[in-house]
Structure formats: structure tokens, C-alpha cells
Amino acid sequence: MTFRALVSDKSAGGTIVSKVREVDEGELPEGNVLVGIDWAGFNYKDGLVLLGHGGLVRSYPHIGGVDFAGRVIESSDARYHPGQAVALTGWRVGEWHWGGFATRARVSADWLVPLPKGLSTREAMVLGTAGLTAMLAVNRLKSEGIKPGDGDILVTGAGGGVGSMATLLLGRLGYKVHAMSGRPELVDDLIALGAREVVGRDVLAPSSKKLLGTKWIGAVDNVGGAPLGELLKQMHQGGCVASVGLAAGDEWSASVIPFVLRGVTLAGIDSVMQPYESRIAAWERLASIFSFTAYERMVTEVGLAELPAVAEKILAGQIRGRVIVQPKH
């Protein structure tokens, strides 16, 4: 039996070429659960993989897609049964292991989560890695003692998947959210999601000072780089920055002053290797508080053949919200 997939291969000159074709099911990698994929997500890391950046893929030919949702076809693991709705995010799937840009995937049962009751496979991929990461970041701010009413929260890179979802989640939980974006056309969308205000990138303009006036009690940072260094200088006493991305780079010049004089916490959020119990808790909380109606304006549906072009756009910062993929199309 064959299945439909976007298969990436590397030419003799090192160029990555991706084409939609039929693949024999026998070529699927090892795993104890076979899943029929309804929807996949498209993330920044997927863009890196499709364009061959970052050395993320170990061998070719390769099927990318770091997250997907669908229904179990076969399982030798007692936790899952045929017809059960499941989702997968992380675990280096789509990098080291064939992923979700296909109508079928064979994976380890340990990497899957059962979908919360009432959550469709499409809704699961509207959330996907972005939603899980945003929820983990919001949970971390809460665990650091930051409550609604304590002060203002900044979400950087708010126009992307994680940023827009963090904006919605924080707003629904009653936090005073300020969404940072360099894209004026997204102002109305971000206000509709729950931002009190949309600010430009100039709020984190470079400064030679080691501390600045306090503005934020918490932040979800999607950009990293120099803006993260400036953000840390503006945090209130005991504030926390949940770091989830590196759109502006993976390095910055920083001082320990915000940490030792203001007790600021910089908390890294890794959604890839989260333990099962943490994933289940985050998915259940997402299902209970996320508004799919409010977020639908930020969702774009595409087919497999469109993904190489989408990869170019996501790495150029031109994607709005969340892109979901229907592999059958």
C-alpha cells in the first residue's frame, strides 16, 4: 500500500528538493503505532527543514512535519486503539524521524497524546506545537507567581503562531497583554485576540544602559537576540521572561544586573522533550480555555504542494498566525 507525502531529497550539489509523491508504506520508519494523518501544522522549524537550514535532518530522503493529528490505524501498544484520535508534537519527529507531511506516519506510542474529549483533529493542529509552547510559557509565568493584576505582560513576535496564541491565552486568563509586532497590518487581529495594546519593535530599541525603567512583570519572548537583552533591562522586580524563540537571533550581549538587582527570571521553554504528564496537562488546559472562534481569523489552510513556498515566507517573517496542512490535498 502507498500513501501520499511531501518527500525532501538532497541533490549531489547539496540542494534540497521537495516533491509530492506516493511512498510505499514499507518505507516508513520503525514504530508501534500507525496513524492516518488528517492535519499537520507548519512551524518555523519546518521551514528550516524544508530549506535545508540548521542541519536538522540526519538523512535523506526525508518527510518533514514536526506535528500532526489524526486517527490510529494500527497499534501494538495497549494505550492506543484503531480509530482513536491522537496528536504528536516534538520528540525530533520531522527532523530525525519522518513526520506529518504525509497521509500516514509510523511512530512510537510514547510520543503520542490522546486528544482531549471534544477536540477535533483540525483544532488540535490549529494549536499544535505553537499552542503547546504558548501554554507552557503561560504556565511558567503562573508558576513564578505572576498573577493577573500584577502588572503588564509583553508578548514579542506576537504576529506568529506562538506569539498570537500566547496573546489569546493571556488575555482570556485576565492578564494585561501588550503585543509587540513590527507588522502594522496585524494590529486589529491582535486586539481582537485580547491584547490591550499593540506596540512596535522600538519598545526594545538598543540602549547602552544596564538597567532601564521598569515596564513589564512578565513576558513571552519569541524573538531572542538583542531585543531579549533589552527586555530583561525593563523587567519589574521579581519579573519573569519565558523564552520560546530566536527569530532575531540566538545571541545577545547582556549583563547580570537585572538578575542580581531585580531578581528577574529568564525561563527557557522547551516543548520538544516535555514529559507525557506535562503534555497531557497542557493539552487539557488548552482545550478548556482556548477560543477557536476568536483565533480562526489567524488560521491559513494549505496543501502539501504549497509548503516549499510557505517555508520561504515563514523564515522571512511573513506568516500570520498559524498555518495548518491537509496532507490529502
Image: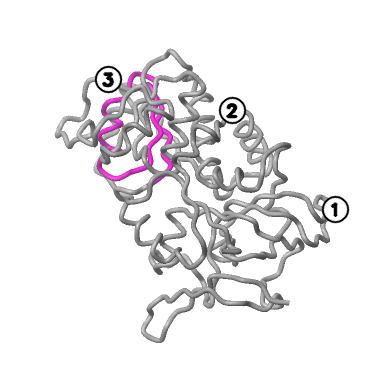
Residue hosting label 1 = 78
Disc nearer the start of the sequence (3/2): 3
Please give left or right for residue 78 compared with residue 65 in the image. right
**Image quadrant where residue 1 sits:** bottom right
Label 1 with label 3: CB-CB less than 8 Å: no
Separation of residues labelled 3 and 2 (CA atoms): 30 Å
Q: Is residue 223 magenta?
A: yes
**Pointer 3 residue:** 214
Of label 1 and label 3, which has the lower sequence position?
1
Q: Nearer the viewer, residue 144 or 315?
A: 315
Q: Amino acid at mark 2?
A: Ile
Q: Nearer the viewer, mark 1 or mark 2?
A: 2
In the rendered view, how is the structure colored?
one colour
Residue located 59% across and 51% down the image: 89
Residue placed under numbered mark 2 in the picture: 289
Label 1 or label 3, whichever lies nearer to me, is 1
Q: Please tell me which residue lies in front, 79 or 185.
A: 185
Task: Identify the residue at horizontal 57%, vertical 53% (top origin).
Answer: 90
Q: Residue at x 41, y 75 (%)?
A: 16
The circle drawn on residue 123 is none
Q: Which residues are magenta?
A: 217-245
Q: Nearer the viewer, mark 3 or mark 2?
A: 2
Circle nearer the N terminus (1, 2): 1
Q: Residue furthest top?
A: 149
In this picture, residue 137 sits left or right of residue 203: right
Marks 1 & 2, CB-CB < 8 Å contact: no
Q: What is the residue that sits farthest to the left in this orientation?
A: 208
Helix, strand or loop at label 3? It is: loop
Q: Residue at x 50, y 39 (%)?
A: 296
